[in-house]
Image (cartoon, rainbow, N blue to C red):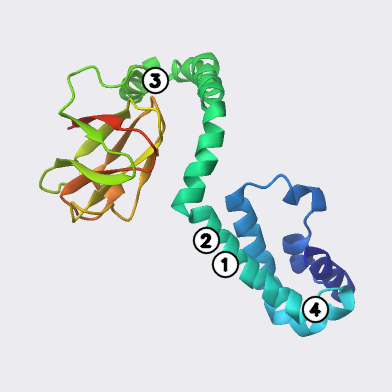
Amino acid sequence: MSNALSAHAVVTENVELLKRADTLSSSWYKFSEEELITQGTIIFGLAKPLMSELAVYGAKEIDVLNLEKALTVFASAVSSPSLAIDQRKVDNKQVVKIIGEIKDHFSTRLDILMRSFEVNNPALYELYILARAIDVNGPVKQPTATAEVAPKAVQEVFAAPYEGKTLFTLRNTGTDVVFFSLSAKNTEAGSTEVALFPGETRSRLAKNLAPSGTFLMVRNEGETIAPIKIWVE
């Protein structure tokens, strides 16, 4: 489809179309799932109004329609919770390596760069140091609450009146990835879920989780109990 659009663009001297449609075949194998969906949607959007003109370049109308169907099926598969969990279980083997690379990047590059702000912008530098302390060590004070989330369950781990500036920090001390969210009901996850990998600590403001909601929920799709520590500030 991309090649057909590119050929059409060359023949019609449509430079803008050529820029948007021309993608190396090898690039498709390197795209992430999200990039595949994005690029595929762009190609479909370009091809749809030109369906009747692309057949001569090797892309029939049925090919364009099939691309739309394929995008829908692929997007649903990528967002499927069970498939996402399976993929993350495979990816967990790489987590330690990736985290190590990130920490090396911070200590060998970003930390050095930020030192230039210690004198010129001490407030910014202090905020950075505080953020790095959370990243490296996690919160140092006792957790506000702890919970053990049963396997294959969605569970309330904390409840409080909604304030957008409330900061939730969660640490997953279990062996399976879990997802936390803010919900108006204590029986279901919120619409925006944040993945929390084994051993990971993450923070979110309430306003970045949901526009409203009383219950902090954790969804555990794993096979074992997920121990969770919660800090609320």
**Spatial distance from mark 3 to mark 2, Cα to Cα?**
49 Å
N-term mark: 3 or 2:
2
Asked which secondary structure carries label 2, the reply is helix
Residue type at tag 3:
Asn
Image spot of residue 110 (x, y percent): 50, 21
- The residue indicated by pointer 1 is 72
Cβ atoms under marks 2 and 4 closer than 8 Å: no
Cβ atoms under marks 1 and 2 closer than 8 Å: yes
Image spot of residue 187 (x, y percent): 21, 53
Q: Quadrant of the N terminus?
A: bottom right
Asked which secondary structure carries label 1, the reply is helix
Image spot of residue 164 (x, y percent): 20, 47
Residue 120 circle label: 3
Cβ atoms under marks 3 and 2 closer than 8 Å: no
Q: Is residue 174 left or right of residue 167?
A: right
- The residue indicated by pointer 2 is 76
* Residue at x-position 38% and y-position 18%: 136
N-term mark: 4 or 3:
4
The residue most toward the bottom is 52
Q: Which picture quadrant has residue 125?
A: top left
Asked which secondary structure carries label 4, the reply is loop
**Spatial distance from mark 1 to mark 4, Cα to Cα?**
19 Å
Classify 85 as above or below 97. below
Residue 60 circle label: 4
